[in-house]
């Protein structure tokens, strides 16, 4: 069921012809988890970047997450308990699953998503596959059907760098869709479909000088933001959070 959607346009000839790999060994391979961010979906949310992606969009901002090599690998049940506790303590209202390709690890991530749902939190999932294809595969892949069923808000479709989107939040290109699969975010998706919405970007600078970025921006916008913050690699710094508004034609 789709309750509301801001459907993407264009790029039909560019759709990538990949299919998800077969179900894995049940472990979840992941790269990074944050208990709270406001740049990866509606409201304050936890977010996990999984590792491994068979889609491999040219121009992807996270090519370091294509291979599973170097990933953390853990049983999803243990991770889910830990992440629900961390998200709740941080005041998060849900979790966002991104990567990497979440549906390449649908079974393991369904365990995590269902744990958040059981705790009264919401689930947002990004995918480089389109919802239409996911539904076809779900007919014979219970793991894909299970993750779809545990998702409230889905951003779907490959990233096509020749079709940059500057009018809707969270996604990178105009062909991608934002869909409410349950009523939780239906009003928000309807508003985006009719009037677009602003995006945001968080830049976190750790005391050891590590810079981590949540959200989405063009290379030029990100470079300008970091320049404005005066970030230097040789200077320890406290955490900084900055917000960058996308152009919003509404
Ligand atoms: S699906 Fe996402 S992670 Fe995978 S290549 Fe495309 S943009 Fe990158």
Image: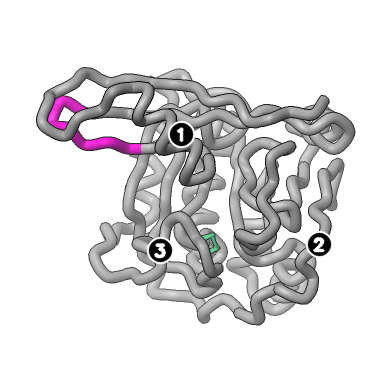
Marks 3 and 1, how far apart in space?
22 Å
Please state, as top left, top right, bottom left or bottom right, where the C terminus lies in the image: top right
Secondary-structure class at tag 2: loop
Q: Where residue 39 appears, x then y in whole percent? A: 52, 31
Tell me whether circle 3 and circle 1 mark residues in contact (CB < 8 Å).
Answer: no
Magenta residues, dominant SS class: loop
Secondary-structure class at tag 1: strand
Taking the view exactly as shown, the residue that stands out farthest to the right is: 194
- Given residues 70 and 163, the one toward you in this image is 163
Q: Which mark is residue 10?
A: 2
Residue at 79% across / 33% down in the picture?
196
**Which stretch is magenta?**
206-212
Per the image, the residue denoted by label 3 is: 63
Residue 14 appears anywhere in the view:
yes
Q: Where residue 69 appears, x then y in whole percent? A: 27, 70
Per the image, the residue denoted by label 1 is: 46
Is 211 a magenta residue? Answer: yes
Tell me whether circle 2 and circle 1 mark residues in contact (CB < 8 Å).
Answer: no
Secondary-structure class at tag 3: helix
* Within-10-Å neighbours for mark 3: few <14, some 14–19, many 20+: some
Q: Where residue 44 appears, x then y in whole percent? A: 52, 24
Q: Earlier in the sequence, mark 2 or mark 1?
A: 2
Q: Is residue 117 left or right of residue 26?
A: right
Marks 2 and 1, how far apart in space?
31 Å
Q: Where residue 80 appears, x then y in whole percent? A: 40, 44
Q: Earlier in the sequence, mark 3 or mark 1?
A: 1
Q: Earlier in the sequence, mark 3 or mark 2?
A: 2
């Amino acid at each position: 069921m789709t309750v509301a959607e801001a459907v993407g346009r264009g790029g039909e000839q560019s759709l990538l012809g990949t299919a998800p790999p077969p179900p894995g060994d049940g472990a979840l391979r992941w790269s990074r988890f944050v208990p709270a961010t406001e740049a990866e979906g509606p409201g304050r949310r936890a977010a996990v970047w999984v590792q491994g992606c068979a889609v491999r969009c040219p121009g992807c901002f996270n090519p370091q997450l294509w291979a599973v090599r170097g990933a953390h690998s853990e049983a999803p049940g243990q991770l889910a308990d830990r992440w629900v506790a961390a998200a709740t303590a941080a005041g998060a209202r849900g979790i966002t699953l991104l990567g990497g390709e979440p549906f390449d690890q649908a079974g393991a991530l369904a365990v995590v998503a269902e744990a958040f749902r059981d705790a009264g939190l919401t689930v947002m999932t990004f995918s480089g596959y389109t919802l239409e294809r996911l539904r076809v595969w779900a007919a014979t892949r219970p793991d894909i059907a299970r993750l779809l069923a545990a998702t409230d808000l889905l951003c779907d479709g490959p990233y096509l760098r020749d079709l940059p989107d500057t009018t809707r939040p969270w996604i990178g290109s105009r062909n991608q869709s934002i869909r409410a699969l349950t009523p939780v975010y239906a009003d928000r998706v309807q508003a985006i479909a009719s009037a677009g919405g602003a995006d945001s970007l968080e830049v976190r600078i750790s005391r050891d000088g590590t810079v981590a970025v949540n959200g989405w921006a063009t290379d030029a916008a990100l470079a300008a933001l970091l320049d404005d913050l005066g970030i230097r690699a040789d200077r320890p710094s406290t955490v900084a959070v900055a917000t960058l508004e996308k152009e919003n034609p509404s």
